[in-house]
Amino acid sequence: MSRHGRARRNSDCTAGGPRPTVRAPRQRQRVEGTEQAFVIGILTSAADFARARAWGVSNAADFESYLADTAELLADVAERFDVVRARMFHPQDFEEFCVLHGLDPAEPAARDRYLVNPPLRTQLLAYQGEELAGDFVPRLVRAREDGLTLCHADLVLDGGLYGGAGGADEDHTRWVRAAHQRGGEVFRRMLVGAGAGVYELRLRVDAPGGRLTAAARVLQWEDGVVRINDEDLELVCAVLCAGLALELSGVAVLHGSQGSAAAGGARGGAADEHFRPASWAWSSSGQDWAPAARPVRLDGVAAQPGYSLGTVG
């Protein structure tokens, strides 16, 4: 029985590693010299839940019950494994994966293979006890979309980011790594110039095969400490890297609330009302990023030309 006094339902779509179908003592599973990881796929909408029921991934009565059971399962495995990772279980992606590999979608082994498929590892998020139905489920959805962008960036860089194209040589890897460092420095200078506040970065680079896009929410305090989700930082740096490495044109907009009030309030301090809306725009012709030549509108956000990144320490 579960802690809520009802029979435990099968709520895990699949797990890469030992399945905790029977409760074990509250201790981490560990083998000397190894990190014990648990990987789970999570359905993120009622429509996806209904579509996946035919494959036997859950016998929960409805999506809300499924989420409650999955949250209970996550709490259990988080106490017993060193690392717990999750990704969105996308029914159409899974169906296509099974067709490609000749698998039966009703077999648990097919779901295991889908979740740990190396090209999809960029969609994985570390689970650290977050509320499942709060911020974590939307992050899983974004992680799938962002993971597709990361795979695209890796493809145009001939496998330089993740080895997706199979066997990039050392010189090529160093070239991509240098571009990645330059991209990270571009982003850092944007934030340093903006100062304290709460911002969102929107980024677009015109790449072969379609545009590469990224978005990231950033909280920056007066002392320069920055809070950003790891997956958002990875995506921004990857898109900047691809643009700089291949000398692709692009545009970026940083907008939000500038000042200590947003940061102070977020830290639990007194709100000091001295903050103001701010937005800046930069563009790249391929080799570097500079203030946009004219006002920019990106994804509905209007911004004036930004400050020179070369003058920011």
Image: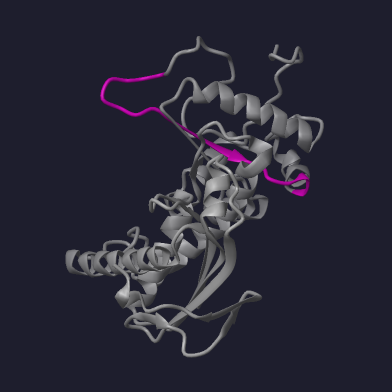
Does residue 35 belong to the magenta stretch? yes
Is 147 one of the magenta-colored residues? no
The image quadrant of residue 111 is top right
Give x and y (percent) for residue 18: 48, 25
Residue at the limit of the structure toward the left, as seen here: 171
Drawn side of residue 10 relative to residue 238, left or right: right
Q: Is residue 206 visible?
A: no
Percent coordinates x, y for residue 2 in the rendering:
69, 15
Residue pictured at 58% horizontal, 28% vertical: 74
- Judge whether residue 132 can be spotted in this image: yes
User: Is 21 in front, or is 144?
Assistant: 144
As drawn, 151 above or below 249: above
Q: Residue at x 36, y 83 (%)?
A: 286
> What segment carries the magenta color?
29-47
297, above or below 122, in the image: below
142, 62: nearer the viewer: 142
Q: In the rendered image, which quarter is residue 156 located in?
A: bottom left
Residue at the farthest right position:
61
Quarter of the image that includes the N terminus:
top right
